[in-house]
Amino acid sequence: MYTQEITVQNEVGLHARPATYFIQKANEFKSGIWVEKEERRVNAKSLLGVLSLGIVKGTNITLIADGSDEKEAVDALVSLIQNNFGE
């Protein structure tokens, strides 16, 4: 299992278009991937799950992956968030 905490800094948080990019990236990996905010954990490959967390600018989240490509998966998602989802 590999985890990393990150703060979402883009203006709209993890909603609509950024969430779609996030889900698409998560689905490129074989590992199980979760997003945790406070005490809630959802599947990072589920758009409704990610949107249900209500992640806004400045929110700290933890990315958790478990599987054969867990480190690569978390690193790719962290990079996507740090680069403001390519916007």
Image (cartoon, rainbow, N blue to C red):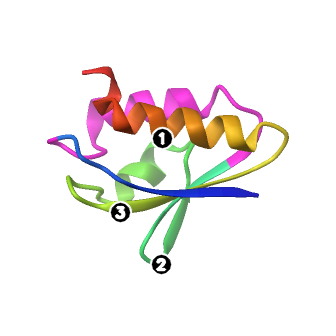
x and y, in percent, of residue 61 in the image: 42, 60
Circles 1 and 2 in contact, beta carbons < 8 Å: no
On-image quarter of the C terminus: top left
| Residue ID for mark 1 | 78
Q: As displayed, is residue 29 above or below residue 54? A: above
- Residue 75 vs residue 59: left or right? right
Q: Residue at x 21, y 40 (%)?
A: 10
Tag 1 secondary structure: helix
21 in magenta:
yes
Q: Which residues are magenta?
A: 11-32
Q: Amino acid at mark 2?
A: Glu
CA neighbours of label 1 inside 10 A, class few (<14), some (14 to 19), many (20+): many
- Residue 84 vs residue 30: left or right? left
x and y, in percent, of residue 66 in the image: 76, 52
| Residue ID for mark 3 | 60
Q: Which image quadrant is residue 2 in? A: bottom right
Residue lying at the far top of the rendered structure: 86
Q: CA distance from mark 1 to mark 3?
A: 12 Å
| Residue ID for mark 2 | 39
Q: Residue at x 60, y 43 (%)?
A: 74
